[in-house]
Image: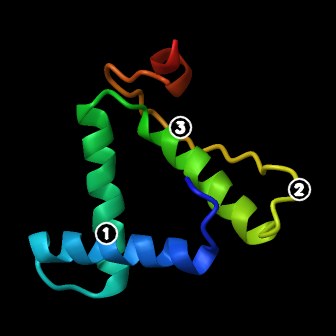
Amino acid sequence: MTHARIPDRADYARAALEAFERQVGRGDRYTLILDLITDLGHLASKHRIEFLGLISQAIGIWAYERMHPDGDGEMPRVTISIDGYRPKHARRRKERAA
């Protein structure tokens, strides 16, 4: 992502959420965001992208930007797991890059 400021990034996300809302109908912000994240997970699976790793990385970046808006600091490590879940046909990010 570009070096946009956090308020600008929130505006980018708002525009995406508004487009999503036009597709699925009205709802409260919490439910719309939850549904969008869920549907992004289905899209990732469709494209054989390992969603938990992607979400873990995104949460780490989000936390980093909130903790270190000046860009100085350690990237937090985030791990997400689901008991008993094994993704089918998922490729990890490193495997796609090779």
Q: Is residue 90 above or below residue 60?
A: above
Pointer 1 residue: 16
**Distance of label 1 from label 3 (alpha carbons):** 22 Å
Pointer 3 residue: 53
Pointer 1 or 3: first along the chain:
1
Could you tell whether 15 is left or right of 94 in the image?
left
Q: Quick check: marks 1 and 3 in contact, CB under 8 Å?
A: no
> Few, some or many C-alpha atoms within 10 Å of disc 1 (few <14, some 14-19, many ≥20)?
few
Q: Residue at 49% x, 24% y: name it.
A: 92
Residue in the foreground of this view, choosing between 4 and 62: 4
Pointer 2 residue: 73
Pointer 2 or 1: first along the chain:
1
Residue 65 picture location, percent across and down: 71, 64
Residue 69 picture location, percent across and down: 77, 70
| Residue 28 is at least partly visible in this image | yes
> Few, some or many C-alpha atoms within 10 Å of disc 2 (few <14, some 14-19, many ≥20)?
few
- Label 1 sits on a secondary structure element that is helix
Q: Residue at 58% x, 56% y: name it.
A: 2
